[in-house]
């Protein structure tokens, strides 16, 4: 009578090999996305400047996956500086204690799309600035719907001869969040945004006291995540300094 031992032996070996494979896979270090390290090199923290002064800034970015700005491995158009005028000390302390926060949905979409290739926040670029758009289009449902169509399907002739490219990769919900951010925040007199690792900005708030004003500077960069990871989780890094006007 034939024995069944070889069959049981084969099954046992297969199960053992399967268990060993799982064991060693569990021991393998999991690939992990590392947050970018962002440094606001200048101006220095607690620097004091004369009111209505032009100030140069410099930002460095180092990311284990994306590269280093000192080797031109970081796209400068993906680096953002926020300059926020702070009216009172308690608000300043609260913001510093919170540290670097996630972006609001609209600006988060803009900085991970290609918006900054053609648009600045205040200055002239290939297309109109976000400030100009917010002034031309009050935040009505009709204007929001119009801008959603312009962004998704492209447009031409509204701001000169330059053509607005299509954005089929963005959903209507994402475009709407972007438009709403522009119409609500782009003309905020207390906050200005600057694109790039180097540049300059001017401090001085119209209608406010010229003495002892505080400004919170936040430099930030959102990385590209792991190339082979599902969903490509993107991480934000940043740095904050405070400057003062006299």
Image (cartoon, grey):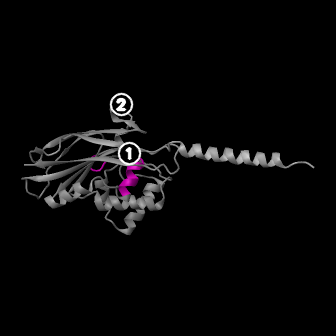
- Does residue 187 sit above or below 243 in this rendering? below
Magenta region: which residues?
106-123
Residue 16, given in percent of the width and then of the height, sits at 68, 46
Taking the spot 39% from the left edge, 64% from the top edge, the residue there is 144
Residue 158, given in percent of the width and then of the height, sits at 37, 54
Say which quarter of the image contains residue 67.
top left
Q: Secondary structure at mark 1?
A: loop
Decide which of 118, 19 is in the foreground and name it: 19
Crowd tier of the residue under label 1, counting other residues whose Cα lies within 10 Å: few below 14, some 14–19, many 20 or above: some
Left or right of 58, for residue 171: right
Taking the spot 41% from the left edge, 62% from the top edge, the residue there is 176
The first of marks 1 and 2 along the sequence is 1
Reading the image, the residue beneath label 2 is 71
Reading the image, the residue beneath label 1 is 35
Q: Is residue 113 magenta?
A: yes
Decide which of 184, 85 is in the foreground and name it: 85
Residue 55, given in percent of the width and then of the height, sits at 17, 41
Say which quarter of the image contains residue 221.
top left
Left or right of 47, for residue 155: right
């Amino acid at each position: 009578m034939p024995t069944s031992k070889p069959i049981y032996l084969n099954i046992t070996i297969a199960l053992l090999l399967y268990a060993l494979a799982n064991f060693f896979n569990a021991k393998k270090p999991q690939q992990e996305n590392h947050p970018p390290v962002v440094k606001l090199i200048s101006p220095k923290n607690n620097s004091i400047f004369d009111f209505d002064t032009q100030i140069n800034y410099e930002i460095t970015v180092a990311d284990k996956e994306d590269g280093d700005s000192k080797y031109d491995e970081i796209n400068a158009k993906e680096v953002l500086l926020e300059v926020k005028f702070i009216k009172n000390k308690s608000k300043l302390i609260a913001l510093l204690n919170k540290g670097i926060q996630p972006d609001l949905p609209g600006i988060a979409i803009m900085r991970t799309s290609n918006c900054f290739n053609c648009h600045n926040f205040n200055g002239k670029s290939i297309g109109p600035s976000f400030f100009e758009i917010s002034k031309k289009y009050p935040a009505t449902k009709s204007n929001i719907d119009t801008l959603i169509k312009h962004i998704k399907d492209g447009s031409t002739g509204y701001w000169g001869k330059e053509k607005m490219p299509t954005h089929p990769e963005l959903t209507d919900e994402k475009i709407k969040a972007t438009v709403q951010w522009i119409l609500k925040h782009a003309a905020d007199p207390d906050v200005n945004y600057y694109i790039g690792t180097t540049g300059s900005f001017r401090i001085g708030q119209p209608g406010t006291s010229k003495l002892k004003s505080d400004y919170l500077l936040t430099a930030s960069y959102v990385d590209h995540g792991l190339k082979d990871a599902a969903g490509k989780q993107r991480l934000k890094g940043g740095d904050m300094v405070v400057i003062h006007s006299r």
